[in-house]
Image (cartoon, coloured by chain):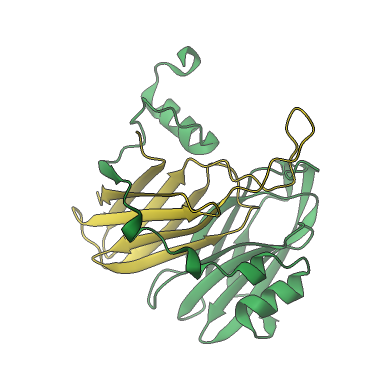
Chain colours: A green, B yellow
Amino acid sequence: MSKQAGRGPDRTRRLIIKGTVASGLTGFGFAGTSFLTPAQAADAALWPKDAFQQKVQDEAIKLLYGKAVEESDKIKLDAPEIAENGAVVPITISSTLADVASISIIVTENPFPLVASYKMPAGAQAMVGSRVKMAKTSKVMALVESGGKIYSATKEVKVTVGGCGG
Amino acid sequence: MASTIRVRAVASGEMTEVQSLIQHPMDSGFVKDAKGDLIPPHYIEVVEFEHRGKTVFTALWGPAVSKDPYVKFSFKGAQKGDDLKVSWVDNKGATDSLVAKIG
């Protein structure tokens, strides 16, 4: 702890970046109450198990969406050219496509290519930022569901040290 | 017990930007421990964000989402002072939730 003492904003930033949350800190700047009531918790039944357990990306996409994918230049996929640490690769996806219902991330060379899928209600902003693990250098695909169709954008990310412990 | 969830939601005009950070190992099942044994998969599967009883964002995660997962998104229709509820469930059935005030 002593290493992180002082410099409030710096420390908060470090918390956000590294995700090392010490129990005594309230530096992230929220007022909240924690409940441990499973009755209203997120529903595990929503999880598309078959798609997440597929080892081939085309099969995963088929199970997730059941539709063909077409490329689109209306998707912005922000990912580093080179990721030094494959355990934490920041990926932000946004799109100017209309009526976006979901955004998914595929890392083609990962043991399970489907990494994450985000759903949003109609009229929401088509943007999501998250951090993913990459086993090795791979293509990263952003899939955007818009107006009942699936669009994609792809970018290669070079990984220096893999993030799956391989 | 401190919550595993940290969330910051800021309303600006009609959009509210949400950043959340959850403490979770997100073990992929491919990493070995010091003894050389595989650490079994342990990861969050579903995170839901609710505003006024409606789901405004759902994250479906696999084991390749980074440890202590972070997610950022925006949604419409909230005002300063509204509640935003965050809840998660992992592959072992563990859960946590939190209600934050939108600032």
Q: A65 or A12, which is in the foreground?
A: A65
Q: B7 or B62, which is in the foreground?
A: B62
Q: Which residue appears at 79% of the width and 59% of the height?
A: A109
Q: Quadrant of residue B4?
A: top left
Residue A89 position within the rendered picture, expressed as x and y whole percent measured from the top left: 65, 47
User: Is residue B84 among what the camera can see?
Assistant: yes
Q: Which residue appears at 41% of the width and 31% of the height?
A: A12
Q: Is residue A125 above or below residue B87?
A: below
Q: Quadrant of residue A70?
A: bottom right
**How many discs mark residues in the rendered view?**
0
Q: Is residue A34 above or below residue A77?
A: above
Q: Quadrant of the C terminus of chain A?
A: top right
Is A69 situated left or right of A160 in this image? left
User: Is residue A142 among what the camera can see?
Assistant: no
Q: A80 or B84, which is in the foreground?
A: B84
Q: Is residue A147 above or below residue A121?
A: below
Q: Residue furthest top?
A: A2
Q: Is residue A15 above or below residue A92?
A: above
Is A23 situated left or right of A142 in this image? left
Is A106 situated left or right of A129 in this image? right
Residue A153 position within the rendered picture, expressed as x and y whole percent measured from the top left: 67, 70
Q: Which residue appears at 77% of the width and 57% of the height?
A: A111
